[in-house]
Amino acid sequence: MAASAAALRHLAPLGARLARLPPQGRAAGRLLQPQQQQRRGIRLSAPAPIQVTVRDALNQALDEELERDERVFLLGEEVAQYDGAYKVSRGLWKKYGDKRVIDTPISEMGFTGIAVGAAMAGLRPVCEFMTFNFSMQAIDQVINSAAKTCYMSAGSIAVPIVFRGPNGASAGVAAQHSQCFAAWYGHCPGLKVVSPWSSEDAKGLLKASIRDDNPVVMLENELLYGVPFEISEQAQSKDFLVPIGKAKIERQGTHVTLVSHSRPVGHCLEAAAVLAKEGVECEVINLRTIRPMDIETVEASVVKTNHLVTVEGGWPQFGVGAEICARIMEGSAFNYLDAPAVRVTGADVPMPYAKNLEDNCIPQVKDIIFAVKKTLNI
């Protein structure tokens, strides 16, 4: 204690001298303000980008929309007390309670019918399927009740509902849990169908879907839930929306157009990076919306690159890629093609359980590279 007191007595005169210094002298001991840093030639680095997983982006979107509109509620199997089978609804039941986040019995037809009826009555339900394979149990409610009611009522009854959950192949879950329903639901007038890839896609599309007055099917991907993506400062706003029906060019290119949705978008970007080392520049389009499809963005890209490759995880016959090829063939962009369009799809078989067979049934980066070289004849 005596030593500490002696040290303080020694520093006291120094403190007094500092107090008598002019302001500019005292500033030397403080952090420089941004204007001072700029005058002195100090360059500030940009703030580190924020990374958010797709799971957390969906959770943020649900939280913000539940807070914003008291008509919004979430229902489905294990969405409440268990925080969701994939933890997408983590914390929402504790925050909003039993009336806004509702656990249901294992009866897709039953709880989907409840959700559709609630939408017709003026609420805005978000109906979660543990996997879209189980939505087949409720297909009558989704198509005949939700999708057709606005038309059949001459526009007097809106059905503002979101059907969401994981779609397509996961890993090791075999034939009954691996199907892609993009073509199924994209076939039906009265529905809007969105298919996000990144965290920004997931957050912006879910918020836009909840606010839309039409039934929207949101096809997520289980293998993307834990994947982190950088998100912009704009996407962190509670007002951030991704417009339904608008594709996004993820990578600019001049030699070939790659069009995809959901997880295969990442495969396309990986393939594009490999091909760039060989002098082939791929333009990668993330569809984001299956219905209504932004064919104008695809056409503009084909006019520029003169080549088209579509990539999807679903089956080939009557698939999303088949629709894109048909629309290009029927439009003016067809005249700009220098080679036939090529489709990369899932194999035309039910999904096998064995890992090596499963890998051969799902489009891989090497398959995309092969298709690009085929259409470019290299």
Image (cartoon, rainbow, N blue to C red):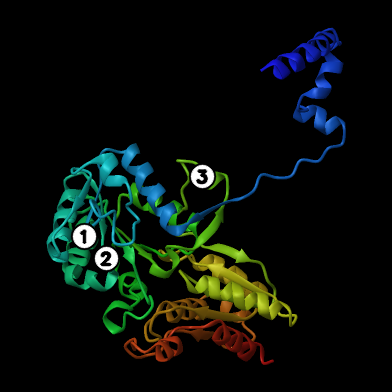
Mark 1 neighbour density, 10 Å: few (under 14) some (14–19) many (20 or more): many
Which element carries disc 1, helix, strand or loop?
loop
For residue 111, above or below residue 290: above
Mark 3 or 1: the one toward you: 1
Residue 168 horizontal/vertical position (percent):
36, 75
What residue is shown at x 61% (from left), y 91% (from top)? 374
User: Where in the figure is residue 48, as x and y percent of width and height?
Assistant: 64, 48
Q: Which residue is mark 1?
A: 77
- The answer to which image quadrant residue 248 occupies is bottom right
- Compared to residue 283, the image places residue 32 above or below, namely above
Residue 307 position, x and y percent, is 62, 81
Q: CA distance from mark 1 to mark 2?
A: 7 Å
Amino acid type indicated by mark 3: Gln
The residue drawn where x is 68% and y is 80% is 275
The mark nearer the N terminus, 2 or 3, is: 2
Asked if the residue at tag 2 contacts the one at tag 1, i.e. Cβ–Cβ closer than 8 Å, the answer is yes
Per the image, label 3 sits on a secondary structure element best described as helix
Q: Nearer the viewer, residue 226 or 25?
A: 25
**Distance between the Cα atoms at labels 3 and 1?**
29 Å
* Tag shown at residue 130: 2
